[in-house]
Amino acid sequence: MEIKEYIDSGIIESYLLGLATPEEELELQQLRRVFPELNVEIAITERKLEKLAFEDAVEPPALAWDNIIQRITWEETNRDYGRTRKKDSSNIHIHMAPRKDDLITVHKYWKYAFICIFILSKLFLIGAIIYGLKYYRELKSQPAQTPTQQEQTR
């Protein structure tokens, strides 16, 4: 096998991405000793992958770094190494689970009240449609009055 074919096979990319099998990794390590140009190709491919990763990178939120540092320092200062330690009051402890009184609750009877109001509104809507149609039919069934007849009825 020629070294150029080996490089073009994609084994270097799979090795750098951690997708190569142990046998392929061992073979690449052995070939690196024999062919120094493989080391150069690995370095070039590594730079290309790093460049691609930075091109598509998404900037983290501004507070992410502060939160990470705060969590690391909190864990370091609160480790128990079998010694009794004085508690450091400068650390901030954040409760992830909310307390019971922090939740917004709705009484169960509101659900039934809402259902009753919803049903009543639909009944009123149906009634309005029915009476509106009756009124419309009555207007249609009456003979058309002329302006003089309208003045006489007033």
Image (spheres, rainbow, N blue to C red):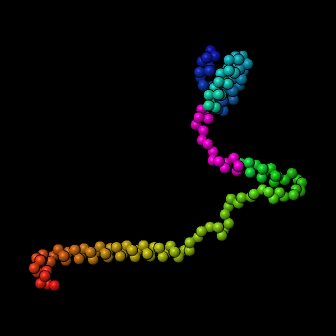
Q: Of 109 and 49, which appears nearest the observer? A: 49
Instruction: State which region is magenta.
Output: 52-67
x and y, in percent, of residue 134 in the image: 23, 76
The front one of 48 and 145 is: 145
Which residue is at 66% across, 32% downward? 18
Return the residue nearer the eye: 111 or 11: 111
Residue furthest out toward the top: 2
Q: Nearer the viewer, residue 47 or 13?
A: 47
Residue 36 at x, y = what percent? 70, 17
Q: Quadrant of residue 58?
A: top right
Question: From where the camera sits, is residue 13 visible?
Answer: no
* Viewport quadrant of the C terminus: bottom left
At 48% across and 76% down in the image, what residue appears?
A: 113
Q: Seen in the image, is 78 located left or right of residue 52?
A: right
Give left or right: position of 118 versus 64: left
Residue 59 falls in image quadrant? top right
Q: Residue furthest right?
A: 83
Residue in the image at 58% along x and 37% along y: 56
Residue shown at 53%/76% (left/top)? Answer: 109
Q: Quadrant of the N terminus?
A: top right
x and y percent of residue 27 in the render? 69, 23
Q: Is residue 7 above or below residue 70?
A: above
**Is 49 covered by the magenta stretch?**
no
The answer to if 53 sits in the magenta stretch is yes
Q: Is residue 104 visible in the rendered structure shown here?
A: yes
Q: How many marks?
A: 0
Image: 145 above or below 10: below
* Residue 145 on image: x %, y %: 12, 77
